[in-house]
Amino acid sequence: MGRILGIDHGDVRIGIAMSDETEFLASPLTTVRNGKSAVDEIIALIKDHHIEKIVIGLPLNMDGSLGPATEKVRMFSGKLSAKTNVPIFENDERLTTVTAHHNLREAGLDGKKRKGVVDMAAAQVILQDWLDMQS
């Protein structure tokens, strides 16, 4: 067992979460601005935290079909896999941002504070969902 990185890919920000070493619990880690250096920043996180697996949220349409956002994520995933040997798994991310907003609202964060952490929280939901399915 080892640490797993969860990724919520967005057009502006990329939310990052990480599991504990037992691969039981996901926690928010950081956000990375989506731009030219995003892949390199994530590669640095992979090295710094000794990541053994990556789970990236796959944005499917509500009917389960693939859409334009799916292609963006798969292109990003391809760039990431070209720079690391760490295996990358896709996980259905439908409604994860809605769930993340709900969880943050329940935790008492207002709209402005939620905006800054919702990407990490969505990555946490994606990763926790994947971890739960593995056990």
Image (cartoon, rainbow, N blue to C red):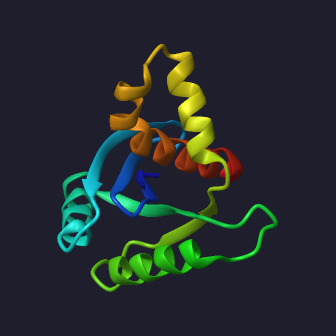
Q: Nearer the viewer, residue 64 or 46?
A: 64
Residue at image point 50% right, 44% down: 122
Q: Residue furthest front?
A: 111
Whether residue 4 is situated above or below residue 42 in the rendered picture? above
Residue at image point 55% right, 36% down: 100
The quarter of the displayed image where residue 91 is located? bottom right
Whether residue 82 is situated above or below residue 61 in the rendered picture? below
Q: Residue furthest right?
A: 63
Q: Where residue 68 appears, x then y in whole percent?
A: 57, 78
Q: Where residue 90 appears, x then y in whole percent?
A: 58, 68
The quarter of the displayed image where residue 63 is located? bottom right
Residue at image point 35% right, 26% down: 113
- Number of numbered discs on residues: 0
Q: Where residue 70 appears, x then y in whole percent?
A: 57, 74
Residue 19 visible in the shown view: no
Q: Image check: 11 left or right of 73?
A: left
Q: Nearer the viewer, residue 101 or 132?
A: 101
Q: Nearer the viewer, residue 44 or 1?
A: 44
Residue 122 visible in the shown view: yes
Whether residue 18 is situated above or below residue 37 in the rendered picture? above
Q: Residue furthest top?
A: 108
Q: Where residue 9 appears, x then y in whole percent?
A: 43, 61
Residue at image point 62% right, 56% down: 93
The quarter of the displayed image where residue 60 is located? bottom right
